[in-house]
């Protein structure tokens, strides 16, 4: 099954190095793919499924005070469990909610406290094996968590199916 693109509108820029899956960063290894966009952007489910968790994702409440407070929604569908992070979750989205590809899960919130020369608003997108009920931290110098999968190829397919064109990596052309 091909996913639908998760962002309703706006820029669809493929992530730079720190936003790619598996990028080594200051505090951890990146567990997902960051899709840079505008604040308040609508985030849609990429496939039908059931909400299995809603969690504090970044910020003080989540144990990462170097970022602003955001939430994540975890939805289990045919591909496994998809984590949509760095959102303000809609109140109507609850554990047990059944969602489809036209279901809005929430809106993008600012996550970065300071401008580092790249977008400060993004959908952080993760993929897990079926049965996962919470997101994970991938510690520096640790192996990739067994239940964490790379969503890059499926996101690329979704982009190309929704637009009919190849993804553009800033300054480097199609990827």
Image: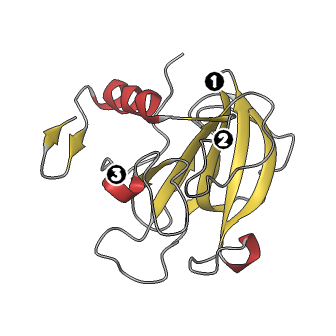
x, y (%) of residue 32?
A: 52, 47
Residue designated by label 1: 79
Spatial distance from mark 3 to mark 2, Cα to Cα?
22 Å
| 24 on left or right of 111 | left
Q: Secondary structure at mark 1?
A: loop
Spatial distance from mark 1 to mark 2, Cα to Cα?
17 Å
x, y (%) of residue 135?
A: 71, 50
| 59 on left or right of 41 | right
Q: Nearer the viewer, mark 1 or mark 2?
A: 2
Tell me if mark 3 has few (under 14), some (14-19) or many (20+) residues whose alpha carbon lies within 10 angstroms of its own.
some
Residue designated by label 2: 145
Q: Are marks 1 and 3 in contact (CB under 8 Å)?
A: no
Tell me the quadrant of the picture where the C terminus can be found: top left
Tell me the quadrant of the picture where the N terminus can be found: top right
Q: Residue furthest front?
A: 141
Q: Secondary structure at mark 2?
A: loop
């Amino acid at each position: 099954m091909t996913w639908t693109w998760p962002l309703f509108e706006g820029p669809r820029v493929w992530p730079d190095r720190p936003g790619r899956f598996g990028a080594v960063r200051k505090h951890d290894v990146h567990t997902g793919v960051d899709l840079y966009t505008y604040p308040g952007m609508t985030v849609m489910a990429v496939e039908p499924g059931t909400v299995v968790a809603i969690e504090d994702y970044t910020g003080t409440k989540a144990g990462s005070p170097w970022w602003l407070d955001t939430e994540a929604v975890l939805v289990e569908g045919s591909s496994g469990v998809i984590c949509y992070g760095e959102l303000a979750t809609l109140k109507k989205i609850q554990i047990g909610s059944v969602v489809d590809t036209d279901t809005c899960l929430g809106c993008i919130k600012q996550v970065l406290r300071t401008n580092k020369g790249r977008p400060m608003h993004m959908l952080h997108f993760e993929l897990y094996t079926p049965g996962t009920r919470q997101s994970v931290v991938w510690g520096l110098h640790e192996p990739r968590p067994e239940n964490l999968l790379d969503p890059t190829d499926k996101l690329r397919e979704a982009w190309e199916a929704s637009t009919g064109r190849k993804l553009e990596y800033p300054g480097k052309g199609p990827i």
